[in-house]
Image (tube, grey):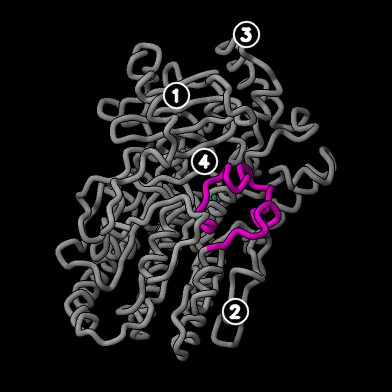
């Protein structure tokens, strides 16, 4: 079990006060930094070195951040970055799960183009010649390096994408003893016990299929570097300092593992929050008339040792989970502060582009489920912030409502680095938005996800025997609902293995088309339509009552991403 709540709340008020103090101090520092910008140095006509790129990836972070309007999340450093950069209000991932989202970001191509729609296919095996973002930068004179999670673990493209390894010398606190992230012996033991049990019960592949985890959260009274994100930040800073000594521009990927489960961070971040401040969702049900296959049974969370396999997550537990999620967000935020301060202190900020993003959102009980892996707003919308040294002063701190996609980051960074764009890119550079955040932009953006209800939580089809595991009753329950809704259209092979939900977001609508992805001419088996002007939480599918609008949106959908790009002209390209 994680630390009892009674022990954790003791110092929360005091620490929250400290959090606010940190925020004020940082904002003061931030304004000092803004005051001494060196933009004029870059405009006097002398040759400007290609910009460094600090690429900050945050795993599973929904836009519940101060900069995005949260009154609860304590994220002073991300907020300060947004206050001096450009924030994207409507940024979307291409698929709301780690590997497909990241493979798409890093190759600049969409999940189906690179054939990565679940967590078990390695993009490089399937696309031997595709050029990743760091690989392209490397070929154009950049030093490229990462620490933490940039690509999905195990699919890190070491040979082709990276020009060097991260720092490994004595200037970093030694890695403490962790077992699957946990440092508390009782949690390490719970993980070992749970894993042993599922292997005995379901065979050696059970852990690979998502079973047998430790507890959902841990907050030990320990310094930041005890856990992986703090440790990796130290490595990133040391790596940056090494690279500052040579002439090459660098691409430094700093990938945070939190707030991905398990929610593990030092206790002081848990203490920043008080239960009474937490805002829990009031949307405890899936959308009325929504796709029964569109919501899963929270498989990812339920695999944790301290979460019930079946049945409701009670209110107290739900609150603890939300608090744990937010605590890890604040932990990540504090590490980002360290990285940005170090960048500034090294004198590199004036020639560094900073891109901060998350690979997808997360349902914290929203629509009655916990986890990512859906086609809805809550899982597909992501935080995205860009800061460049040369941004127009009047646009600093602005946000844009333009629809953008994570796949757009690759071409954007090519433009900012002044290098060519590989022909395989399927995104569009959003650099024009840096000079005019209000301009007309894409008419739609696209995400996709194969049947969330009847896949494992890594999005691969159900493994043999999965129905006999503790997930069995959950699978049975969602399947019953699908059969009831779909009637004669029910076909186990289609729904388990070949059905894709293609989600299109326009300014006013979310439109989801469920169809067989192996057959380009397949008719949709189900359509969802949500009116964001009236129903931003996507509570009612209005497709059935609006046949004309569905027809119109289907035409727009069929034009695909190519037919919904921002207006092009010579200046923009
Ligand atoms: Ca993720």
Q: Which numbered marker is on residue 488?
A: 3
Near mark 1 (Cα within 10 A), the count class, few <14, some 14-19 or many ≥20, is: few
Which residue is the site of mark 1?
A: 285
Near mark 3 (Cα within 10 A), the count class, few <14, some 14-19 or many ≥20, is: few
Q: Residue furthest left?
A: 394
Element carrying mark 1:
loop
Which residue is the site of mark 2?
A: 164
Of tags 1 and 4, which is closer to the observer?
A: 4
Which residue is the site of mark 4?
A: 372
Percent x, y for residue 324?
47, 50
Picture quarter containing residue 532?
top left
Distance in Å between CA atoms under marks 2 and 1? 48 Å
**First along the sequence among labels 2 and 1:** 2
Of tags 4 and 3, which is closer to the observer?
A: 3
Which portion, as a residue range, is magenta? 105-132
Asked if the residue at label 4 sits under 8 Å from ligand 1, the reply is yes
Name which residue lies at 50% across and 21% down: 291
Q: How many marks?
A: 4
User: Taking 381 as reference, is 39 above or below it?
Assistant: below
Name which residue lies at 57% across and 81% down: 167
Name which residue lies at 30% across and 69% down: 388
Of tags 2 and 4, which is closer to the observer?
A: 2
User: Taking 453 as reference, is 264 above or below it?
Assistant: below
Asked if the residue at label 2 sits under 8 Å from ligand 1, the reply is no
Of tags 3 and 1, which is closer to the observer?
A: 3
Of tags 2 and 1, which is closer to the observer?
A: 2
């Amino acid at each position: 079990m994680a630390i009892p709540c009674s022990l954790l709340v003791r110092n929360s008020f005091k620490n929250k006060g400290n959090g606010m103090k940190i925020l004020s101090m940082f904002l003061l520092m931030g304004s000092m930094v803004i005051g001494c910008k060196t933009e004029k140095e870059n405009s006097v006509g002398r040759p400007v070195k290609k910009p460094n790129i600090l690429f900050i990836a945050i795993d599973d972070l929904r836009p519940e951040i101060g900069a995005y309007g949260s009154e609860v999340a304590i994220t002073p450093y991300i907020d300060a970055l947004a206050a001096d950069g450009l924030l994207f209000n409507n940024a979307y991932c291409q698929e709301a799960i780690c590997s497909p989202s990241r493979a798409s970001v890093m190759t600049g191509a969409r999940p189906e183009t690179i054939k990565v729609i679940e967590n078990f296919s390695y993009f490089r095996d399937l696309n031997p010649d595709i050029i990743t973002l760091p690989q392209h930068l490397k070929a154009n004179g950049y030093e490229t390096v990462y620490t933490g999670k940039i690509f999905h673990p195990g699919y890190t493209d070491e040979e082709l994408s990276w020009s060097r390894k991260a720092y490994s010398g004595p200037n970093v606190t030694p890695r403490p003893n962790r077992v699957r992230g946990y440092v508390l012996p009782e949690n390490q033991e719970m993980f070992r016990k749970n894993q042993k049990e599922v292997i005995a019960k379901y065979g050696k592949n059970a852990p690979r299929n998502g079973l047998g985890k430790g507890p959902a959260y841990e907050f030990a009274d320990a310094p930041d570097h005890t856990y992986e994100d703090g440790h990796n930040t130290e490595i990133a800073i040391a790596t940056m300092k090494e690279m500052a000594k040579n002439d090459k521009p660098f691409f430094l990927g700093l990938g945070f593992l939190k707030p991905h489960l398990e929610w593990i961070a030092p206790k002081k971040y848990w203490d920043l929050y008080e239960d009474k401040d937490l805002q829990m969702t009031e949307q405890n049900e899936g959308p009325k008339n929504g796709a029964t296959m569109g919501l899963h049974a929270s498989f990812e969370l339920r695999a944790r040792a301290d979460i019930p396999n079946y049945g409701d997550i009670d209110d107290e537990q739900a609150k603890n989970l939300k608090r744990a999620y937010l605590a890890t967000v604040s932990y990540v935020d504090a590490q980002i502060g360290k990285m940005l301060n170090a960048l500034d202190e090294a004198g590199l900020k004036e020639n560094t582009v900073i891109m901060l993003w998350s690979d997808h959102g997360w349902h914290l009980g929203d629509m009655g489920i916990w986890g990512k892996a859906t086609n809805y707003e809550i899982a597909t919308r992501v935080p995205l912030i860009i800061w460049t040294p040369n941004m127009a002063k009047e646009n600093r701190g602005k946000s844009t409502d333009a629809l953008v996609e994570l796949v757009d980051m690759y071409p954007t960074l090519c433009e900012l680095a002044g290098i060519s764009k590989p022909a395989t890119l399927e995104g569009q550079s959003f650099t024009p938005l840096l000079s005019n955040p209000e301009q007309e932009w894409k008419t739609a953006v696209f995400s996709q996800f194969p049947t969330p209800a009847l896949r494992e939580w890594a999005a691969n089809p159900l493994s043999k025997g999965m129905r006999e595991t503790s997930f069995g009753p959950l699978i049975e329950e969602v399947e019953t609902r699908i059969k009831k809704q779909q009637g004669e259209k029910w076909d186990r092979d289609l729904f388990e293995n070949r059905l894709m939900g293609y989600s299109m977001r326009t300014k006013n609508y979310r439109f989801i088309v469920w169809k067989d992805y192996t057959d380009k001419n397949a008719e949709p088996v189900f359509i969802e339509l949500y009116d964001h002007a009236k129903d931003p939480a996507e509570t009612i599918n209005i497709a059935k009552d609006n046949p004309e609008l569905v027809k119109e949106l289907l035409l727009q959908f069929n034009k695909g991403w190519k037919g919904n790009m921002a207006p092009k002209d010579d200046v923009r390209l």
